[in-house]
Image (cartoon, coloured by chain):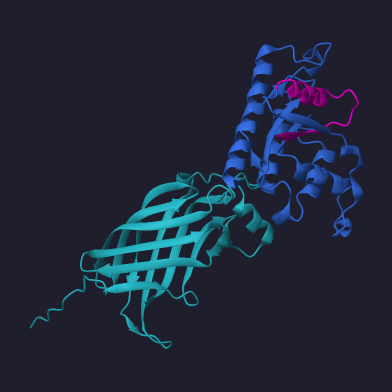
Amino acid sequence: MTTLTQTQETLPTGTWREDPVHSHVGFEIGYAGGVFRGSFAPFEARLEVDGSGASILGEARADSVHVLDENLNAHLLAPDFFDVERTPLLRFESTEIRRSGNDVTVGGVLNLKGTAVPVELEGTIGDAAPSPSGGERLPLHLETTVDRRAFGIEWQMELPNGEPALAYDVKLSADLYLVKG
Amino acid sequence: MKVLGISGSLRRDSHNTQLLRAAAELLPEGVELELWDGLKTVPPYDEDDDLAEAPAAVAELREAIASADAILFSTPEYNHSVPGQLKNALDWASRPLATSPLRNKPVAVVGASMGAFGAVWAQAELRKVLAAIGARVIEGEVAVGHAHQRFGEHGQLTDDDLREQLAEVVDGLDTVTRARDLLAA
């Protein structure tokens, strides 16, 4: 006997926005043999789903970047990295969203340091469920890896062993709890 | 627009100070260059002295940087690197990093040496240090080698190519500084 299950391919209708307390947007990058992590807060994320389709928009101020070393934080804001004086906003806008069961793939354009680059995010989506604080909450996790040089972030320094100090690949991730608004 | 000229050499007849004077002759319309002569008075950096009220020479340096629209550095090369007193002054000026007057400040680096290479390694190191502090480092290099043979009796650069490169660097500084003003407007 065969059991047929239908794979969910649609997204729940409505306008969904980030729950700022329970959502997290961050990056991971190899640094001097370890992994260095940082985050952006506050940020805005919006998933819009209606009869005509779905779209995702994410936005953060570049100066909302946060790492646990204040000197490094200051360097990240400088022209070497995000150059917040010239390019104060970071932005992602989807062009295509595909869902297959709990898996989701989002194509779109990521704009960092004033440079727009097409990217593909992959991740998972959960079921919308009642939130303890009222309304409905939808978990969505997305991530991608980009080469920071594509955005003109080329800073590098040699370690004593001759290896580059900072990796070029950066993993970006968004752990979102979206609330229907 | 005011450019602050900082020479990394303390010597009275310094070729690098001369190079800044030569740059002053090549400035675009509306740009003035002021030489900062306080480098020798900056005390050695000591975190114990890095208090809300900075040592007088440091306060003057920070104020000179803050009130300039851009900075042109000219550095000699000591042991393949930046002279200690210039690095020391930048270490003072960089702190605290989040509020340093050098943050986003358009800066350019040129250099002169008596050897053949014109302080290229010191210039590269100085650019690296300035970028780490958060300054907006302008592309472009002027390497005046054999510096003792490069200046005429009125202090002018006698080599046409070098003069052209220096004018380009100064123009670049002017362009970037004006773009920054537009952004702020």
| Total tally of numbered discs in the picture | 0
The color chain A is rendered in: cyan
Up/down of A118 relative to B7, above or below? below
Q: Quadrant of residue A14?
A: bottom left
Image coordinates for residue B24, horizontal then vertical, percent: 75, 24
Up/down of B59 relative to A25, above or below? above
In reply to whether residue B23 is colored magenta, the answer given is yes
Q: Is residue B127 left or right of residue A49?
A: right
Up/down of B82 relative to B13, above or below? below
Image coordinates for residue B70, horizontal then vertical, percent: 70, 37
| Magenta extent | B1-26
In reply to whether residue A116 is colored magenta, the answer given is no
Whether residue B125 is visible to the viewer of this picture, yes or no, is yes
Image coordinates for residue B131, horizontal then vertical, percent: 66, 44
Q: Quadrant of residue B143?
A: top right
The color chain B is rendered in: blue
Whether residue B77 is visible to the viewer of this picture, yes or no, is no
Which residue is located at x 33 percent, y 58 percent?
Answer: A94
Q: Is residue A111 left or right of residue A29?
A: left
Quadrant of the image for the N terminus of chain B? top right
Image coordinates for residue A171, horizontal then vertical, percent: 46, 59
Q: Is residue B125 left or right of residue B47?
A: left
In the displayed orientation, state which residue is furthest to the left. A1
